[in-house]
Image (cartoon, grey):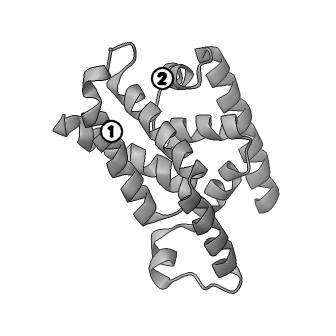
Amino acid sequence: MEELYKVIQPKIYAFFYVNTADRELSEDLTHEVFYQAIKGLHTFTGASSLQTWIFAIARNILYNHYRSKKYRQQLAGTLADRTGAVISAEQQAITNESLQLLAMNIQQLDQLPREIVIMRIYGELSFKEIAQLIGKSENYARVMFHRAKMKLQEKLEGIDG
C-alpha cells in the first residue's frame, strides 16, 4: 500500500492543484482521499484498478468541496484579494508561466473535457480508466481528449502567434 501511495499521491495532488490552484487545500484534499480510501478499502471490489478507484474518490471529494459553504466563502475571498494582489516571489519561482497559461486554458474547457484532460495529463490515467470514471466508452474518452487537446493547441498558438 505504501508503494502504491508513493506512485498515486503526486497524481492526486496534481489533480487537486490544477482544479484549485491552492497548495495547502490540494494537500488537505489529497490526504482526505487516502484517508477515505483506507477507511473504505473493504468496499473495493476489483471491478477497476485501485488507481481508478482512488481517482473516483478524489473526484467525489472535489465535487463535495465545490458544493461546500467553505469553498464559496474562499472563492469570494480570493476574488476580492485578486483586485490588486501581488504574486509572491516564491509562487513566481515555483510556477512556470507557460504551465500557468496551460492550466488557465484547461480551466476554460467545458467540465467533462476539462476532467478528461486533467485525469489524462496530471493523473496519468489510461483512457480505459478515464472511461470507467466518467461512465462512457474508452473511444469517447479518447475523442474528447483529442478534441480538447486541439482546442488548447489553437488557443495557445493564438497567444504565441
Quarter residue 57 falls in: top left
Q: Secondary structure at mark 2?
A: helix
| Quadrant position of residue 115 | top right
Say above or below: 1 vs 135.
below
Judging by the rendered image, the residue that carries numbered circle 2 is: 129
Numbered-mark total: 2
| Residue 161 visible | no
* Amino acid found under the numbered disc labelled 1: Gln
Secondary structure beneath label 1: helix
Going by the image, does 37 lie left or right of 131?
Answer: left
Numbered mark located on residue 36 in the image: 1
Q: Is residue 66 left or right of residue 33?
A: right
Residue type at tag 2: Glu
Spatial CA span between label 2 and label 1 = 20 Å
- Quarter residue 23 falls in: bottom left
On the image, the x and y values in percent for residue 6 come to 25, 43
Residue at (42% x, 27% y) in the render: 52
Instruction: Identify the residue at horizontal 62%, vertical 23% (top origin).
Output: 141
State the quadrant of the N terminus.
top left
